[in-house]
Amino acid sequence: MAERTYEEILQNVERWASQEAKRFGNTIAILPTEASTLQTEDVMAKAKAVLFPINNNWEKATDLETLKSEIEGCTKCDLHLTRTKFVFGVGNPNAKVMVIGEAPGAEEDKRGEPFVGRGGQLLDKMLLAINFPREEVFIANILKSRPPGNRDPLASEVDACEPYLWKQIEIIKPKMILCMGRISGSNLLKTGSDSLASMRGNVYDYHGAKLMVTYHPAALLRNPNWKAGAWEDLQKFRKIYDEMTASDG
C-alpha cells in the first residue's frame, strides 16, 4: 500500500474528528502534526486507527495489555465507523474459565466492558451460583465492536475479529470456556448447525480448552422458563471443571 502523504493523513483525522465532534458535542482541535491532540479518549482511539492502521504486531503479544494496545484501534471491518468504545474484555488474565458472548450491546459500547447492564448482572449471578466470581474469570466477545442496532454479527466481521479472540485464549490458557448463546456457540464451533438445542449439553475441544454452550443472559431475561435448563448447563460445567482441576493434583 502506498504511503499516505501528510495532507491525506490530516484530512482523514479531520474527518474523524468532525464526525466525533457531532456525536460528543466536543470542540476538536487537530494540530498540524501526525500525532493529533484530541479532547476525548474515544476520539483519540479513532484518530489512532487512521494514523496507525492495524498491523500484525498483535500476533507477537505475550500478555493481554500488549494485545489490547495493538488492536484497540482496529479498522479491519466497518464496525469501527460506528463504535463508541472498543470492547476488549475484562477479568483475570490468568483465568481458568473464559466466558464468551457474541458482541457488545449499547451499554457495553458506551462503557467499553462486556456484559454490563441487566444481562451482565444476571451473568454475574449465574457465575456466582457455580462459585465463579466475575473477577476470577475472563469475559470477552467474538466481536470487539458493537454491530448497529445489535444485529447479528456478519460472517466477514467474525472473520476479521475472531483471530483476536484466539490470541486472547492463547495468552490466558483457560481450562474451560462457556459460550453464552446460540450465536456465540455456532460462530466459534462452526458445526454447521445454528441450533442451541444441538449444542447445549455437549463438551467440545476448542483451542486447548473444553467448551460448553448455554443460554445468553438476555434470552433468560426474555424467557425465564429457560432458567432451569441454564442451571443444568451450569451445574454440568462446574462438575467438569472440578473433575479437570482435581486430576491436576
Image: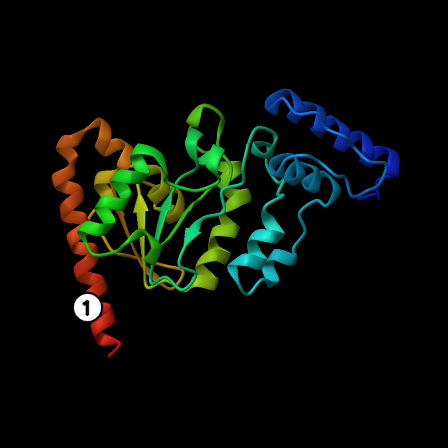
- Reply above or below: 156 against 166: above
In the rendered view, would you say 150 is above or below 157?
Answer: above
User: x, y (%) of residue 239?
Assistant: 16, 61
From what the image shows, is residue 128 above or below residue 198? below
- Return the residue found at the far bottom: 249
- The image quarter containing residue 31 is top right
Q: Secondary structure at mark 1?
A: helix
Q: Quarter of the image holding residue 47?
A: top right
Task: Please name the residue shown 76% across and 31% down the image.
Answer: 12
How many marks the image carries: the answer is 1
**Colouring method of the image:** rainbow
The structure residue drawn at horizontal position 13% and vertical position 47%, both measured from the top left corner, is 232
* Residue 122 seen from this side: yes
**Is residue 4 depicted above or below 175 in this figure?**
above
Residue 178 in percent (x, y) is at: 30, 51
Q: Position of residue 219 (x, y in %)?
A: 26, 32
Which residue occupies the foreground of this view, 127 or 186? 127
Q: Residue at x 13, y 31 (%)?
A: 225
Classify residue 53 as left or right of residue 78.
right
- Quadrant of the drawing holding the C terminus: bottom left
Horizontal and vertical percent for residue 236? 16, 55
Q: Which residue is mark 1?
A: 243
Amino acid on which the number 1 mark rests in the picture: Glu
Q: Nearer the viewer, residue 104 or 118?
A: 118
Q: Is residue 228 left or right of residue 141?
A: left
Please indicate, yes or no, whether residue 105 appears anywhere in the rendered image. no
- Comparing 42 with 225, the one in front is 42
Taking the spot 79% from the left edge, 44% from the top edge, the residue there is 1
